[in-house]
Image (spheres, rainbow, N blue to C red):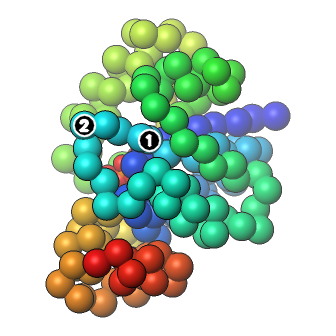
Amino acid sequence: MKKAIYAGSFDPITYGHMDIVQRAVRIFDEVHIAVIQNPDKSSLFSLEERICLIRQVFDDQPNIIIEGFQGLLIDFSKKKKIFTVVRGLRAVSDFDFEFQMALTNRSLLPTFDTVFLMTDHKYSYLSSSLVKQVAMYNGDVTQFVPPTVQTALKEKL
Ligand code: ADP
């Protein structure tokens, strides 16, 4: 059984993330969405809220598993015994950081590999922070996030 981890903050999940997940499940039998609890980064939604929103989105797909984690991704990877991580690449600007992170993770854990999926052109500009900014000023986010997330944003902001 081929398994992969898709890690991120998902604050909140967008159509860009969802596209990567749906493409990853065509490659892997099981995809574990690992939601980061990052103490350095203040998030709009709590870890529980972010997990809950993602669960609602992939409700009918038992091969997509959603979990929270803290600490190093390689430690989560060892715990789960899943050594492949999927990341999305939006633009050249993502590359530097992703390249650094992939190499660092591999030097810490040689069995660890990162697989990159190019964003769909429709979502190449889309990020959670952009969605939050638009929502904060009452802008229309219907083309960026699913209805459950739209409602959650309205309630939160
Ligand atoms: P962000 O970078 O928007 O804060 P995350 O930390 O939640 O998002 O990102 C998790 C993963 O999803 C990263 O690999 C990121 O590059 C990818 N990702 C985020 N938005 C998109 C998008 N619009 N298209 C493709 N991949 C994306």
**Residue at the disc numbered 1:** 36
Quadrant of the image containing the C terminus: bottom left
Q: Is residue 55 visible?
A: yes
Which of the pair 29/70 is nearer the observer?
70
- For the point 43% across and 67% down, the residue is 14
**Residue at the disc numbered 2:** 40
- Left or right: residue 58 versus residue 121 is right
- For the point 44% across and 77% down, the residue is 152
Contact, CB < 8 Å: mark 2 with mark 1? no
Q: Identify the secondary structure beneath mark 1.
A: strand
- Left or right: residue 94 versus residue 9 is left
Mark 1 closeness class: few <14, some 14–19, many ≥20 residues within 10 Å:
many
Which x, y percent locates residue 112?
53, 19
Which of the pair 105/73 is nearer the observer?
73
Q: Identify the secondary structure beneath mark 2.
A: loop
Quadrant of the image containing the N terminus: top right
The alpha-carbon separation of the residues under discs 2 and 1 comes to 11 Å
Which x, y percent locates residue 86?
52, 40
